[in-house]
Image: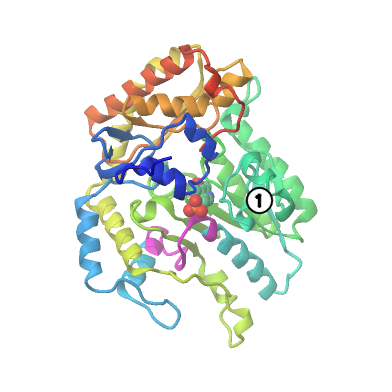
Amino acid sequence: MSPPAQDDWVARSLRSVWHPCTQMQHHETVPLIPVSHGRGPWLVDTQGREYLDGISSWWVNLFGHANPRINAALKDQLDKLEHAMLAGFTHRPVVELSERLGALTGGVLGHCFYASDGASAVEIALKMSFHFWRNSGQAGKQEFVCLAGSYHGETLGALGVTDVALFREAYGPLVRRAHVVDSPDARLAREDETAVDVARRAAAGLETLLQQRAGQVAAVVVEPLVQCAGGMAMHDAQYLRELRAICDRQQVHLIADEIAVGCGRTGSFFACEQAGVWPDFICLSKGISGGYLPLSLVMTRGSIYQAFYDSDVTRGFLHSHSYTGNPLACRAALATLDLFAQDDVLFNNRRKARVLSQALQPLADDARVRHLRRQGMIWAFDAVLEDAQQAATFSRRFYAAALRRGLLLRPIGCTVYLMPPYVLDDEEMHLLAERTLLTFDEVMRTPLVAAWSEPQGSML
Ligand SMILES: *Cc1c(COP(=O)(O)O)cnc(C)c1O
C-alpha cells in the first residue's frame, strides 16, 4: 500500500487519531471531514466545501468560529500571560470571571472552582458535596441521585450519575452507580396529563426515595430544563422548584449541571433562573469559553465554602488540575460574557428563535415526526421509525446525508436536534431549516443499503 498523499488528512487521521464517541469502522461509510477553517456558523473543509454548524460543534460554540472580538481578547491575553499555576498564585482573568459569574447569581453562588472539562466539573461537585457533609459530621452521606436518561460525562465518577446505557453499560463493573429516579420528560405525559403533572409525579417519586435514604444521600444532580445527551428531553420548570423544596426538606444538596443548558442556551443565562431557584452547585463548561478553549467550573454558596475553611488541610477541598483557571480560557470566557452584555444576546435570541421555529413549522404537520419541541435555542423532534434497522442506523445516515447538503447535524438515536450558534442571521436560519427538512425527507424516503445495515447504537 502506498503512503497517503501529504495532504490526505482523512486517511492520515484514520491511521493515527482515535476519534471520540466513534466506532472507527463506521468511517468506512460515514465521512470524516478535514476542517480547514471556520467563519461564523460555518466550517470549511480542505476542499473549500462549507458546512452550516447546526450543533455549535458539540454545543460549545456560541458566537461563531473565529469570532473577531473573542480573537482580539485572546491575542491581547497571549502577550500578557498564557498560564500560571492557580495554587499559591492568582491573576486578573480568573478573578474577574469568578466575580462576574457570581454576580449573575446575585451573589448566591459566589465561589468558583475551576477545571478543564465538563465531566471533571461534575466530579468536583460530587466530591465537594460529599466532603461538605463529612466536614459537617455527616460522613454517612455518600450516595447520589440522578435522573433516568441523564448525562453528566464519561469519566468513571461522572458515569456513575449518567444513565445513558450505551455509555455506561460497557464500563458497568468499574462504576459506582447512583440512584436513578424518574425523568420529568414532558413526553412521558399520560393521557390528560400536562408537563407540570409529569414534573410533579417525577418529583414525588424522588421525595419517596429521599424519605428513605436522605441520611445516605449527599446530592441530587440534574440537567435543568433539558436533558440534552439523553435525547433533548425537556421538562417544565416546575420540576426544579419541586426539586429545590424537596432537597431543602430532606437536607440534600442540589447540583445543577448547566454544562449544556447554561450560557443562554435555554433562553436565560442560567437555566435555573426560569424556575426562580438557585441550586447549591452549578457546573458550567462547553459554551462558557465561547467554544474556544477547554474550561469548566463549579460555582457554590458561601455556606458550603465556609465548611471547608479551617486550619486543618484535610478539611480543605483536595482537588486540582494542572490547567486550573487557565488565563487564556478565562479570558475567552470574559470575552464571551462581554458579548452577552454588549449585544443583548438573550433578547435577540428570542427573535431569532421565532424565525427558526416558523421555518421548521412543516414538521409540525408531518406524520413521520413526533414531539416537535423547543426550549430557548434548542429545537428537537423524534423521527417515527417502525423498522429496527432503520432506527438503529438513522442517526448515522442522517448525519451523512446532512453533510452532503452542507449541514452539520448529528441526531441522537431517532431524535433530530438543532443547537445553532447565536450568530445566525435570518437567511442562515432559513437555510438551516430548509436543509434540515430536505435531509429528513431524504433519509425517511431512502431504503437501507447493505453497508448501513448492521445495527449499532446511536451517536451523539
Ligand atoms: C457535555 C456534558 C458533560 C461533560 O462535559 P465534557 O467536557 O464532555 O466532559 C456533562 N454534563 C452535561 C450536561 C453535558 O452536556
In which quarter of the view is residue 231 placed?
Answer: top right
Q: Which residues are magenta?
A: 101-120
Residue drawn at x 34%, y 46% is 61
In the image shown, does 113 or 60 lie closer to the viewer?
A: 60
Residue drawn at x 53%, y 60% is 120
Vertical placement of residue 154 versus 78, above or below: above
Vertical placement of residue 88 versus 458, above or below: below
Drawn side of residue 455 relative to residue 12, left or right: right
Residue drawn at x 38%, y 26% is 402
Horizontal and vertical percent position of residue 290: 33, 52
Drawn side of residue 137 relative to residue 281, left or right: right
In the image shown, does 457 or 260 lie closer to the viewer?
A: 457
Kind of residue at disc 1: Ile
Residue 8, can we see it? yes
- The residue identified by callout 1 is 246
User: Any magenta on residue 74?
Assistant: no
Number of marks in the rendered image: 1
Residue 277, can we see it? no
Horizontal and vertical percent position of residue 175: 70, 54
